[in-house]
Amino acid sequence: MTRDRTPADVGRYVNDALRDRYFAACRAVFDLAGAAFTETEVETGFGTTHVYRYAPADPAAASRTPVVLMHGAGGNAAQWYPNVAALSAERPVYAIDTLGDPGRSVQRAPIHRPEDAARWLDETLAGLGLDRVHLIGSSYGGWLTLNQAHRAPGRLASVTLLDPGGLEKVGARFFAWIFLSALATAAPKAMRRRLAAWLEQPVLIVPELRSMVMLGVRAYRIRRPVPVPLTDDELRTVRTPMYLVLGARSLLVHPRRQLERVPRLVAGARAEIISSTGHGPQIDHAEKVNERMLRFMDAVD
């Protein structure tokens, strides 16, 4: 048997069999989007970044400033299945598998610090030949997006943060939600819809998404930087046009606190709370959020 020589601080799959089962589950979630994509890979100093590209059919849309999507923790680019069709009808879209999370990217060097995360993402955008992008991040991907606006904003036309990390310290209530959601995935099918409504957790009622998430937990050992919140002074450094979207019942942040704080500290930032949702406004209200993100990017351009 070949010994695994992957360093302990680098993300990796437990074994090839679980990896292949996970990839099959991911493909089923990608298929939910109903949008065609091509795949490419970019070599960086930290490993190989796997990227999915959705191209507009309209030549005029294909020439517009592209969108780059950063998914949440413990997932991959398939999580954008409710959004890619609408976004890519108007602009080129690149959905990235984050290094250190399950997906097709292959991490080879540790990414411990926020500076490392910013360097990795900048190298990825450079490798794609992208000099100006609209960067959109959800949850942990929101922290990566905010971190980029703070540390390496040169390629950013705008940033959109969807119930993001990086605005305040993650509290016990969020970890309790994660724990209860994990327990609920094993509940009998008849109970899942009720639990999904109570927990505001769409994973429980989308079979393909549930299978992908459950397999990802078993198949992959996650290794990525801690999403250290930005201080007030650090937020004041951000000059990139910003759109912040918060779930009214978010357990990751205090929505009304950040609705006041972020526009006060980031010049020109827009902030909005979406009602009847928690941590996933782009999933629970995909049509509304897609339309508003596109409108924001149009205004920036």
Image (cartoon, rainbow, N blue to C red):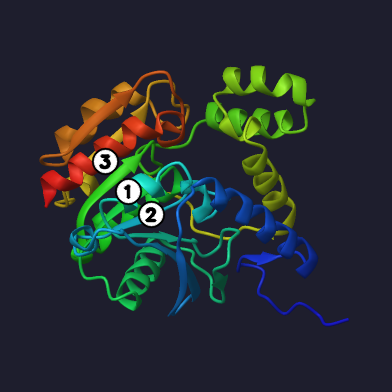
Q: Residue 105, image x and y in percent?
A: 54, 69
Q: Which three-letter amino acid code belongs to the residue tagged 2?
A: Leu
Query: Residue 13 occupies which quadrant of the picture?
Result: bottom right
> 10 Å neighbourhood of mark 3: few (<14), some, or many (≥20)?
many
In this rendering, position of residue 240 left or right of residue 124? left
| Residue ID for mark 2 | 69
In this rendering, position of residue 247 left or right of residue 20? left
- The residue lying at 66 percent from left, 48 percent from top is 212
For residue 72, say whether it is visible: no
Give the vertical position of 127 relative to 195 (above or below): below
Say if mark 1 contacts mark 2, CB within 8 Å: yes
Q: Residue 160, image x and y in percent?
A: 28, 45
Q: Which three-letter amino acid code belongs to the residue tagged 3?
A: Met
Disc on res. 290: none
Q: Which mark is first along the chain, 1 or 3? A: 1
- The residue lying at 22 percent from left, 26 percent from top is 260
Say if mark 3 contacts mark 2, CB within 8 Å: no
Disc on res. 87: 1
Q: Residue 185, image x and y in percent?
A: 72, 33
For residue 98, say whether it is visible: yes
Real-space Cα separation, disc 1 to disc 2, in angstroms: 10 Å
Real-space Cα separation, disc 3 to disc 2, in angstroms: 12 Å
Disc on res. 293: 3
Q: Residue 152, image x and y in percent?
A: 25, 64
Q: Which three-letter amino acid code belongs to the residue tagged 1?
A: Leu
SS at badge 3: helix
